[in-house]
């Protein structure tokens, strides 16, 4: 097993599959009367959040607690950090507390990589800037495998603001490793330069959602921030929704078995309509549930729970 | 004054000869020189070049003396073989008045390790809104001839036109940091495959090329002189090539790091333009802000184009863009780190890798041409009887491994940590007095 989980690219196929299989075992815990395993008793997990993300923090917190770890939540926003305490100083503090794992969310790309240089414990990237969010990719892969029975050979469209999306980057890396084929769809302004060469050579790019939909098993809608409109990435919310939003008629162009995913939180009416989000094809609620199991598996394996 | 006899030294790569330095000037050049009163320096195996001249140095004083002072930067320069450096204006306060440029000039004289020639800001506070008192700086004791808002681009085309026109009155030159600010908003590194992989906002090559293209046309239109700072892209080289072919009075510099390092080092890979150097080195990790610099490190093909342009003269000089930063400003998240790298103590080694052992070309790109651009008389002149003894002695056969802690700069942000580089500065003479001997600073 690896020491840190910083990128979807850190995982080879065997390790990623081990995590997904472990997550499936962890999922059974959620069905028990006592939703707790003793695996990480006496271990300390710090949730170090430099950016508000209640969903992600709670998911990691639930995962750690179900494994009986001690959890320290450190919301770095508005704390000593704003008074000039550096990431390195914070790392030394965590070190002194004896943190076995640090789950870090940070607005700067690469901050978890820097942190990993300065702490002895494992670092889990819970989202860094516009870079990556590897546990999100793992839970997405888990959800696809649970719904469709496999990952190898799947065709996945990732639609929207790929440029700024850490979810998209981690998904491209992980899904390619696991043998799925990814097509990135969006306006050219929101597809980063050299994306295929940068991440996975087999990745396709399309600017035409309608032509892609009939051939995919999964369509993953990304959150689009309205602020992008003010920076001229696209002309208006209405035009965006018309060209790249997933509505009922578009959903019906999908093959019958295809599923619709969204990492949340959604802009209903922008990238996805309520009709689609609430349809049986949508996996949005399952993704949240699966997130806890996957994060349990990641913490368990990173902290060597399997060796104890 | 002391006399120095340098024996059997190869002057700019020619056959070994002796050099006698007396009263601040080169007194004699020839074999078998004899001067009983002179201190003998064995020059066997060494190459003598006219003292190196840097057109682009950040000395950080006044304002950030924790990162560098005029004295510590001067010492680093002397150890790097320099006898003159041009100090950039982005200090705090900004060098945009006669008072500040005279202060820097005077500090340089007091340190007397190299000649410190201040560069004046083009606009008040580097804000890009109003012209600074360029004439007053030109008339000051510092006799400023180069003006630059470096760190910022003079982006307003009308203001740039006015600046180019105005300095014609005293044969001044505008040194532009070419960066179209709207195209680089939030930019963190070169826009390309690596920035996409790392999720860092890209600084596109066209943001530099577009400004250079505009500026050479403005320069041509008003009949002035333009100097382009730290050219970093293959496209910029082509724009310059065309402008020079038309006779535009434009000169350009390239930094050592843009001649060696590619954007891949940001992702932790040891891909360098020089395989010889890559062999013995690898970056400390991914997102290491020591590699954050503005303009950013570019691709391997950009580096190849820059190397070729330096050799064929489309790029006139190597300038260090020596940019010291404190540990706090670099030991942090990439996005929050200040851009810039040290350069003075390692530039010659990189030049040796790129141009070596063509000593005449190295003298041209690192001494004669920068001295001419800056109007520094007495510098950039090959050792010959009667010329000021500003020179540097290099051992080209030596190799040294760069240890940041051993640098003379107050800062440690060298990109070459633990890299083994060719060449070593053995001695530097400023007007006949050694500032460096046996590879060590004399004071
Ligand atoms: Zn600059």
Image (cartoon, rainbow, N blue to C red):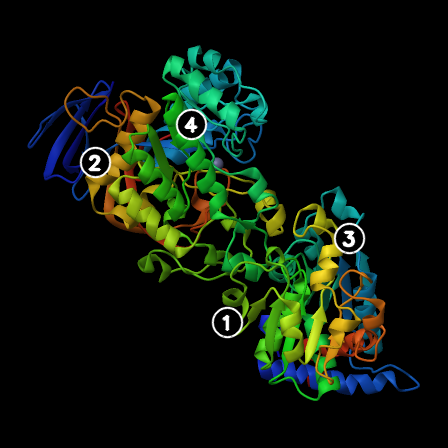
Tell me the crowding category of disc 2: few under 14, some 14 to 19, or many 20 or more residues within 10 angstroms, Cα based: many
> Are discs 4 and 2 both within one chain?
yes
Q: Mark 3 lies on which chain?
A: A
Give the class, few, some or many, for how many residues have Cα within 10 Å of label 3's Cα (few <14, many ≥20).
many
Q: Residue furthest front?
A: A249
N-term-proximal mark, 4 vs 2 = 2
Q: Could you give the CA–CA distance between mark 4 and mark 1, rounded to whole angstroms?
A: 43 Å
- Residue that badge 2 annotates: B48
Q: Where is residue B160 shown, x and y percent of the image?
A: 49, 25
Q: Are marks 3 and 2 in contact (CB under 8 Å)?
A: no
Q: Nearer the viewer, residue B253 or B113?
A: B253
Given the image, what chain letter belongs to the residue carrying mark 1?
A
| B219 to the left or right of A9 | left
Residue assigned mark 1: A201
Which x, y percent locates residue B135?
A: 46, 12
Residue denoted by label 4: B218
Q: Residue furthest left?
A: B32
Drawn side of residue A27 relative to residue B107, left or right? right
Mark number displayed over residue A76: 3
Q: In which quarter of the image is the C terminus of chain A?
A: bottom right
Q: Looking at the rendering, which quadrant does residue B432 occupy? A: top left
| Residue A259 sits in quarter | bottom right
Disc 4 or disc 2, which is closer to the eye? 4
Chain of the residue displaying label 2 = B
Looking at the image, how many numbered discs can be counted on the residues?
4
């Amino acid at each position: 097993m690896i020491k840190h989980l910083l990128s979807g690219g850190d995982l080879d196929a065997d390790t990623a599959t081990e995590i997904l299989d472990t997550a499936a075992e962890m999922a059974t815990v959620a069905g028990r009367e006592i939703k707790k395993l003793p695996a990480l008793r006496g271990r300390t997990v710090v949730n170090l959040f430099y950016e508000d993300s209640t969903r992600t923090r709670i998911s990691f917190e639930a995962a750690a607690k179900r494994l009986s770890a001690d959890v320290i939540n450190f919301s770095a926003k508005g704390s000593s950090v704003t008074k000039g305490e550096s990431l390195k100083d914070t790392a030394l503090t965590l070190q002194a507390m004896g943190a076995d794992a640090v789950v870090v969310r940070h607005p700067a790309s690469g901050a978890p990589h820097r942190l990993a240089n300065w702490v002895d414990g494992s670092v889990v990237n819970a989202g860094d800037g516009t870079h990556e969010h590897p546990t999100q990719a793992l839970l997405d892969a888990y959800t696809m495998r649970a719904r469709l029975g496999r990952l190898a050979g799947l065709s996945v469209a990732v639609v929207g603001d790929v440029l700024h999306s850490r979810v998209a980057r981690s998904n491209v890396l992980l899904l390619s490793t696991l043998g799925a084929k990814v097509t990135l769809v969006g306006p050219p302004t929101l597809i980063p330069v050299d994306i295929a060469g940068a991440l996975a050579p087999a990745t396709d790019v399309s600017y035409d959602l309608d032509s892609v939909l009939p051939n995919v098993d999964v369509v993953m809608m990304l959150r689009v921030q309205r602020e992008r409109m003010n920076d001229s990435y696209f002309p208006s919310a209405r035009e965006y929704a018309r060209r790249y939003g997933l509505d009922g008629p578009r959903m019906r162009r999908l093959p019958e078995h295809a599923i619709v995913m969204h990492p949340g939180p959604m802009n209903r009416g922008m990238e996805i309509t309520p009709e689609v989000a609430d349809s049986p094809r949508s996996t949005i609620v399952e993704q949240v549930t699966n997130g806890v199991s996957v994060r349990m598996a990641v913490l368990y394996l990173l902290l060597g729970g399997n060796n104890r | 004054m002391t006399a120095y006899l340098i024996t059997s030294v190869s002057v700019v790569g020619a056959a070994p000869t002796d050099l006698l330095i007396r009263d601040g000037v080169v007194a004699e050049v020839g074999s078998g020189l004899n001067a009983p009163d002179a201190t003998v320096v064995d020059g066997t195996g060494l190459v003598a070049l006219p003292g190196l001249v840097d057109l682009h140095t950040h000395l950080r004083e006044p304002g950030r003396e924790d990162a560098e002072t005029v004295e510590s930067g001067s010492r680093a320069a002397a150890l790097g073989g320099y006898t003159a450096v041009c100090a950039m204006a982005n200090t705090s306060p900004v060098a945009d008045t006669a008072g500040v440029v005279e202060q820097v000039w005077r500090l340089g004289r007091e340190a007397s390790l190299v000649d410190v020639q201040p560069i004046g800001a083009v606009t008040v506070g580097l804000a890009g809104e109003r012209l600074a008192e360029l004439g007053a700086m030109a008339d000051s004791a510092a006799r400023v001839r180069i003006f630059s808002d470096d760190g910022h681009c003079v982006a307003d085309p009308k203001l740039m036109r006015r600046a180019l026109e105005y300095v014609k009155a005293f044969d001044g030159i505008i040194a532009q940091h070419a960066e179209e600010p709207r195209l680089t908003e939030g930019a963190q590194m070169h826009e390309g495959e690596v920035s996409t992989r790392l999720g860092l906002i890209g600084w596109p090559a066209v943001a530099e090329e577009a400004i250079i293209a505009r500026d050479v046309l403005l320069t041509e239109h008003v009949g002035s002189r333009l100097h382009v700072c730290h050219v970093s892209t293959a496209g910029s080289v082509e724009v310059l090539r065309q402008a020079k072919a038309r006779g535009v009075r434009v000169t350009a510099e390239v930094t050592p790091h843009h001649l060696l390092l590619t954007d891949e080092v940001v992702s932790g890979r040891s891909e360098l333009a020089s395989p010889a150097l890559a062999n013995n080195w690898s970056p400390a990790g991914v997102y290491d802000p020591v590699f954050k610099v503005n303009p950013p490190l570019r691709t391997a093909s950009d580096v190849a184009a820059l190397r070729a342009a330096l050799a064929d003269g489309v790029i006139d000089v190597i300038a260090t863009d020596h940019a010291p930063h404190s540990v706090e400003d670099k030991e942090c998240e990439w996005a929050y780190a200040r851009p810039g790298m040290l350069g003075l103590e390692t530039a010659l080694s990189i030049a040796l890798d790129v141009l070596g052992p063509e000593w005449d070309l190295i003298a041209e790109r690192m001494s004669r041409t920068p001295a001419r651009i800056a109007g520094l008389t007495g510098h950039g002149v090959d050792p010959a009887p009667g010329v000021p003894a500003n020179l540097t002695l290099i051992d080209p056969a030596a190799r040294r491994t760069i240890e940041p802690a051993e640098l003379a700069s107050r800062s440690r942000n060298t990109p070459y940590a633990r890299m083994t580089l060719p060449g070593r500065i053995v001695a530097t003479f400023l007007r006949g007095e050694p500032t460096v001997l046996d590879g060590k600073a004399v004071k």
